[in-house]
Amino acid sequence: LIIGSGTQSGSLRAAHRHKPVPTEGGLFVSKLKAGTPFQDLKDHIFRVTGLRLRCIPIRSRNEHLYASFRVICNTGEVKRLLDSSLWPKGSLVCEFRSKQ
């Protein structure tokens, strides 16, 4: 996603923006070993990126099989964190999307 920053000219203009551009983004991290504490995830992220981020456990239907989390970060950090080499093999990581 990009947001145009050029000049508006002639008949081509952007619509008036009613909502501010969000600065808070997040990741959905799943398929981690069942029972993984959020602190382990926070420590891992800090070790591999140097970022201190908030991690929130997400309940799933299959908690006995795997653990899931929401990782809160700035939108600018999302792309950096979507590097597959940062995450354990077999884990699932994608941009967090709210159900709202």
Image: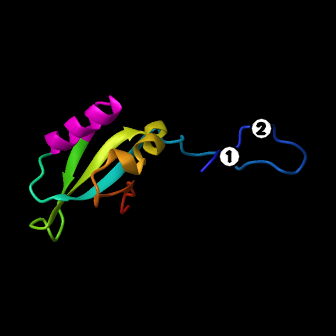
Q: Nearer the viewer, residue 18 or 12?
A: 12
Up/down of 59 relative to 74, above or below: below
Q: Residue 16: which disc?
A: 1
Q: Nearer the viewer, residue 73 or 50?
A: 50
Type of amino acid under label 1: His
Q: Residue lying at the far right in this picture: please name it.
A: 10
Up/down of 63 relative to 12, above or below: below
Secondary structure, mark 2, is loop
Q: Nearer the viewer, residue 9 or 81?
A: 81
On whether residue 52 falls in the magenta region, the answer is yes
Secondary structure, mark 1, is loop
Q: Residues within 10 Å of mark 2 (few under 14, many from 20)?
A: few
Type of amino acid under label 2: Gly
**Residue marked by disc 2:** 6
- Left or right, 28 with respect to 7, comes to left
Mark 2 or mark 1: whose residue is earlier in sequence: 2
Give the residues in magenta.
38-54
Q: Main secondary structure of the magenta part?
A: helix
Q: Position of residue 23 (x, y in %)?
A: 46, 38
Residue at 9% over, 55% down? 35
Residue at 22% over, 47% down? 56
